[in-house]
Amino acid sequence: MKAQRQQLELAAVRVVGAVAGVLPAWLARTLGAGLGRTFYLLDRSHRRVALANLAQCFPSRSEAERKQIARRMFAHFGVLLLELLRFGRLSPEQMRARVVVDGEERVRAAYAKGKGVLFFTGHFGFWEMHAMVHALVFQPIGVLARPLDNPGLHVLLEDMRQGTGNTVIYREGAVRKVLRMLSMGQGVALLIDQHMHSPDAIWVQFFQRPAATTSTLAALALRTGAPVIPVFAVPLPDGRLRLIYEHPVEPPPADSPDPVREFTQRCTDVLEMYVRRQPELWLWMHRRWRDAPAPETKGMFPEVRDEGGDA
């Protein structure tokens, strides 16, 4: 049954991709948004998670406002699916024409240091397309990722991720591969907004709530001296994407009592800033805060309160 379901999922994605590929861009986006809104209505479990997360993180907003954010978020991820399937079919020249780059000089200055560059973002906006185009604007990078449960979809996504020259790095032996790439002056990108079960997870504040977060980014940066640049891809009204390369995140001072945690917090704060600005672009259906705080963190975090302004 599992194999049959996975084959049906792959077939459905291929059909959707084929249809989206022949539609005008505006119509494909409209279809994607409609698909996402349909899942908002039908997918009760993920809708419940999204609304619960939004209630905790935006207590000053009304229930109607939070539902509107959730509906727009589902619509965004429907658009993201179709846009990704369409994007993978474009030529490098067509991909490059679909983006506007903000902060290019920061990236080139970071590469010039010769220590490699660590890029991070979250499940926000159009992160997959951002990585693909980065290889065309600058140079190919390594992308840390988790294999998909569906083997067919895994191959499909991996082909798209590597289509512009990037390398996908999976967990086994990842640190060694990343260190090698950084030593060669190359870039590596990773997501920092997933709930972590692994022993190297640390607890930091995300929307004033303790969230188990990967320590890999901060540990690598402190070990290698590689600059750390936050990146985000947001939609523009004309259908193009704005690729944002923020100022590098400054490492904590040498006398920091917990430099890995402090560095991770600084990076998480940048991600939170973008999510607050455009909450409909982030994956609220993910159970980001699923576990209680680790014993050593109790008392470190303030209670969730109505901060008055959730802009």
Image (tube, rainbow, N blue to C red):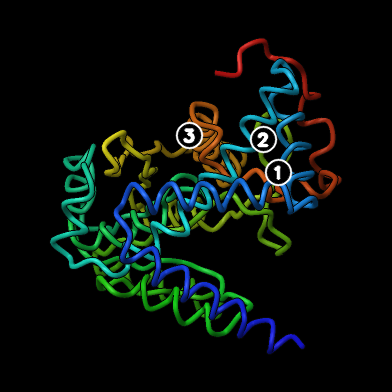
Mark 3 residue type? Val
Q: Position of residue 219 (x, y in %)?
A: 51, 55
Which of the numbered marks, if any, corresponds to residue 205?
Answer: 2
- Mark 1 → mark 2, Cα distance in angstroms: 6 Å
Residue placed farthest to the left in the image? 93
Q: Position of residue 136 (x, y in %)?
A: 19, 61
Earlier sequence position, callout 1 versus callout 2: 2
User: Are dots 3 and 1 in contact, CB under 8 Å?
Assistant: no
User: Are dots 3 and 2 in contact, CB under 8 Å?
Assistant: no
User: Are dots 1 and 2 in contact, CB under 8 Å?
Assistant: yes
Mark 2 residue type? Gln
Mark 1 residue type? Ala
Left or right: where does residue 291 sit relative to residue 253? right
Residue placed farthest to the top in the image? 308
Q: What secondary structure is marked by label 1?
A: strand
Quarter residue 289 falls in: top right
Quarter residue 178 falls in: bottom left
Residue identified by numbered label 1: 211
> Looking at the figure, which quarter contains the N terminus?
bottom right
Earlier sequence position, callout 3 versus callout 2: 2
Residue identified by numbered label 3: 270
